[in-house]
Amino acid sequence: MKSTNYSKKVIDHFQKPRNVGTLEGDDVAVGRVGNPVCGDLRDIYAKVDKERAVVADIKFHTFGCGSAVATSSMITEIAKGKTIEDALKITRQNVAEELDGLPPVKMHCSNLAADALHEAIKNFKEGNKGPLE
Ligand code: FES
């Protein structure tokens, strides 16, 4: 994929991002990651059904580029309804593949989405709320 080519899915998720926002509650943990090179910041809020260990709801906030919005939107769609163990298996590559690819220079945007999700779940498992604390 060329550096300026974006798939229809990327454009769709950028223009109509899913699951934008925040969540609150005892069953919510947040994962925050940033990239010091581009300055982008990503927060993923995961609400976990504790009995079933399932990602019951998920939202994101990002201070970042169009690919940051699209990859965050996509990872929330992929992770919602999954067990937390399955959500941890979602890779950086999965997010880019589900969007039908990203320009190479934008792959790190996808990495931030997966890393923020993993961080949120890790915080949940450790009983932390992440940056909400
Ligand atoms: Fe850094 Fe997109 S340019 S997350």
Image (cartoon, rainbow, N blue to C red):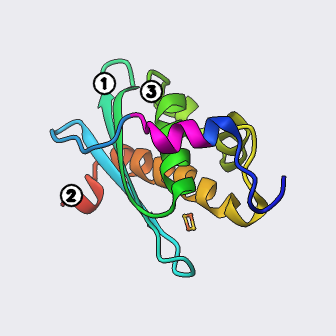
Which label was assigned to residue 49?
1
User: Residue 114 placed where, x, y %?
Assistant: 56, 49
Q: Is residue 109 magenta?
A: no
Residue reaching furthest bottom?
37
Residue at label 3?
Answer: 80
**Quadrant position of the C terminus in the picture:** bottom left
Q: Whole-Å distance between the Cαs marked 1 and 2?
A: 18 Å
Q: Which residues are magenta?
A: 11-18
Which label was assigned to residue 132?
2
Any part of residue 90 in sight:
no
Instruction: Pick the residue in front: 126 or 57.
Output: 57
Give amino acid for label 3.
Lys
Q: Quadrant of residue 125?
A: top left
Q: Secondary structure at mark 3?
A: loop
Give amino acid for label 2.
Leu
Instruction: Pick the residue in front: 26 or 36.
Output: 36
Q: Whole-Å distance between the Cαs marked 1 and 3?
A: 11 Å
Mark 2, Cα crowd under 10 Å, few <14 / some 14-19 / many 20+, is few
Any part of residue 124 in sight:
yes
